[in-house]
Each structure stands twice: as structure tokens, then as C-alpha cells.
Amino acid sequence: MAGGRLEGKVVLLTGIGGGMGRVTAQLFAREGATVVGCDLNPGSAAETVRLVQADGGSIESSAPVDLSDRGDIDRWITDTVARHDRIDVLYNNASLPRFAPFAQTSDDDYQFTIQNELHLVWHACQAAWPHLAAAGGAIVNIGSGAGVQGARALPQAAHAAAKGAVIALTRQLAAEGIAAGIRVNCLSPGVMATPPVLAMFDEFGEDAPVAPIFERTIDGKPGDPLAVAYAGLYLASDEAKWVTGAHLVVDGGASAIM
């Protein structure tokens, strides 16, 4: 692991149990980071730990951690600082939306989505802020293509509202982070080959609601989650030391091509 792009850095990573979180944990550990992950699901988080350790990486896992609970977030971050004396990167990967057409979205589903896509980012950033300031650290937030472009085939109003807010929050935190010495950036993935998307294809085949989106990508396919992880690696590393307030869309060109 010597000489990796994140060598010596302590990285808080939410949602390590699968999809982009698992791939990011594996990549960051290969690049020398000590990954301190959390997830709601102890079993899936343990599998990520096994995979990372089998590859020779350094990872710790706390599960279950309910990121909709500020107390759980505070304990996770406090325990990390107690063990490692620092936090260099907070990578806000986790999200848990509910989907429904706007007119049929219940208040419960709206509040659930905002809580589990926006509030968890707000609270994790706030809890980690003084520790990141002490280390001159960085935050990487995960937005979504839904935060920048509407989709006729996808009933995602609550998800779009939450992720649009994450993108806007990133810019404001970047502005306030200048005085604290904290860089804050955002990645917005497009349609990626994650378990929920793959399950959608299993159910609907070519009629999957996301099909019109990935058909506009550079290769006509859902994206590899590793593409997002590599973009996050750059923003988390010292290579991006003069980058803050950026919003990088990783969607294969779908949002740029009609």
C-alpha cells in the first residue's frame, strides 16, 4: 500500500455494504487509506471488510449505524477520532430514497427521502467539521444526475429535491470551508450498474424506466461504479488540493446529450 494516492489518510465512508460504497472502499484501501466505514446492514458491511482485507487493505466497519440518527453519526465520528486522532476525508456515499410520482408521494415517503439523502449529509458534515478543520481535510458528497436534470420516465421528485439540495449545500460548505481549511466537492453519478438498477433490469428488461437515460451514454450501458470511485479518489486526494466547490457529473454524457 506504500505510495498510494491516499497513503496515511483516515477516510470516513458511509454506506460501505454494497454498490458504489463497496467499490469505493476497495479502491481507497488499495490507494493506502485507512477506511472507516459504516452501514445499516452488518452482514453486507462485513463482506466488504472481508474483500478489502483479502486484498491487503486497511478497513474498519461500524454496523449497524443509522445515519438518520444524529446520535449514531456523532458516536461513529467520535469513536473514529478516539482511535485514529484525526479525520482526513469524509465521503458521504450513503443514501436511501423512496420513489413515487410527485402527485402520489406521501408525506412519509418525502420526509424519509429527505432524511436519508439530505439530512444525513448535513449532520455528518457538521459532526466531522472541526476534525476536518484540524487536519486540513476534505469532504466528498454524492449527488445525482437527478439533482441537475428531470426525467420523464422516472418518478423521482423527492430524490431529485434531496440530491439537488446536496449539490447546493456542497457549494455553500465550500465557501464556508475556505476559512476552516476544508475542501468540499460533489460527485453526481448517472445510471450506474448498482444492485437497485440491476434489479430494475431483471424486472422490466428493455422497458426499465432508466433505459432512455443510459441509452444516451458514451457506450449505451449503465456505468461501472468504479468510474465514480475513481472520480472520488481524485477529489479526496492531495491532487485536488486546489479544487473546492466543484460539481463533477459522472454519467457517461447522458445529461449533455439530447
Image (cartoon, rainbow, N blue to C red):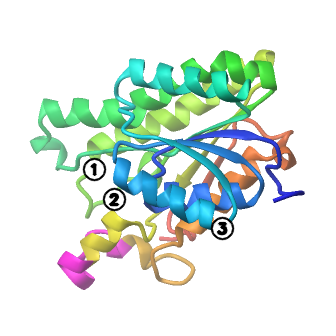
Residue 20, percent from left and from top: 50, 59
Residue that label 2 marks: 151
Q: Give me the residue at 35% from left, 74% from top.
A: 212
- The residue drawn where x is 80% and y is 25% is 135
Characterize the local packing of mark 3: few (<14), some (14-19) or many (20 or more) Cα atoms within 10 angstroms. few
Task: Determine if the magenta segment contains residue 208.
Answer: yes
- Image location of residue 166, percent across then percent down: 49, 35
24 above or below 214? Answer: above
- Mark 1 vs mark 3, CA separation in Å: 37 Å
Give the labeled residue for mark 3. 55
At 47% from the left and 71% from the top, the residue drawn is 258
Mark 2–mark 1 Cα distance, whole angstroms, equals 8 Å
Res. 123 visible in picture: no
What element does badge 3 sit on?
loop
Callout 1 crowding tier (Cα within 10 Å): few <14, some 14–19, many ≥20:
some
Dot 1 or dot 3, earlier in sequence: 3
**Mark 1: amino acid:** Gln
